[in-house]
Amino acid sequence: KLIKVLEKLGKEYERTGQTDKAKQVYDVLLRFHKSDESSFRVAVKLVDLDLMKQDFDSAYNRLQKLEIPKTKDVDTQLAISNLKKQVRITAINNHERYRKMDDKKEVIRYLHVADQFYATYLNKYVTEKAERNEIRMYLAEVKRELGNPGMAAQLYKAIIQDQDEKYSKEAAQLWVGSLAAELKKKSDSGEKPGSSPSDLEKDFVDASDLLERSIPNSTESKESRLRSAQILAAYPNEKPNAITRASKLAKDAPQTQQGVLAARLWLQLSPEK
């Protein structure tokens, strides 16, 4: 009886716009009653109320604790559907707010919210391949804006591995760009290379090969092919591979800047006769 009274009181506060009081009632209800699907629906209401007040931190923290029940209950299914929409809309709206503002430092908080809610949506609510890769593309863009090209590269790679016809070609280009940015970041930090290519460098070479197959005559492809040869040239055991790549690029694109630089590299690496 107490539970029903509290539910009714919370709804009445919601109806009259007294969201703070509604939240207090629902929080009390959750503390007393955590075991069934009605408690899940109450938790969803609390997320909704947090989002209405743009209390994104509180909403995000609640979402991390929510376990999505497998259910045939119509009310619970509706609550899950609404929750999924709210998480997606929150991520997209905050991403758009960031995109539209000129002073990016001032609105960086919107990008952090988008990051949290895209990741939550991707990890908890996406089931279809097409939507999964759509969200990965959005999240990767956010990661790049936040100065984390390495995580963006992982997302682009996952899209390519999914063999998604809609996004794979664009993801391949962005994968190469993100890896290049991460390589520069590592170089600028003073991190010393090892005796063989790092996993990041191997990924870049793989991404370059994929880009060559996808858009073989593009400037982006030729630049990444040159960069791959240069990366491999730094390691004695990879010298034959570097020569092969440099010579092929020089022959494929002799009139381009990338082809000329590849020819020079080829000459530098070739054994003296």
Image: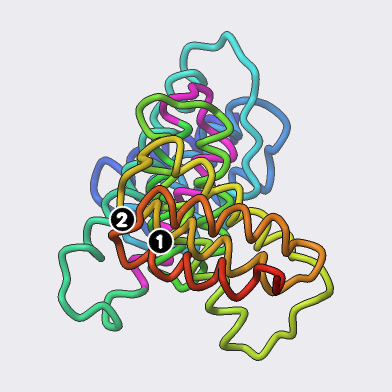
Residue 96: image quadrant is bottom left
Residue 83 in view of the camera: no
Q: Is residue 119 magenta?
A: yes
Percent coordinates x, y for residue 46 in the rendering: 47, 47
At x 30% / y 57%, what residue is drawn? 95
**Residue at the image position 40 percent from the left and 61 percent from the top:** 223
Q: Which circle marks residue 219 in the picture?
A: 2
Q: Is residue 227 above or below residue 27?
A: below
Q: Which residues are magenta?
A: 109-131
The secondary structure making up most of the magenta span is helix
- Residue positioned 38% across, 59% down in the render: 20
Left or right: where does residue 179 sit relative to residue 30?
Answer: left
Could you say where residue 100 lies in the image, as x and y percent from the top left? 15, 64
Check the picture and name the quadrant holding the N terminus: top right
Q: Is residue 150 magenta?
A: no
Q: Amino acid at mark 1?
A: Glu
Q: Which residue is mark 1?
A: 223
The x, y position of residue 192, in whole percent, is 74, 85
Residue 246 sits in quarter: bottom right
Task: Give the residue furthest to the top.
Answer: 72
Where 163 sits versus 144, above or below? above
| Residue 179 seen anywhere in this rendered image of the structure | yes
Q: Which is nearer the eye, 102 or 87?
A: 102
- Residue in the foreground of this view, choosing between 211 and 89: 211
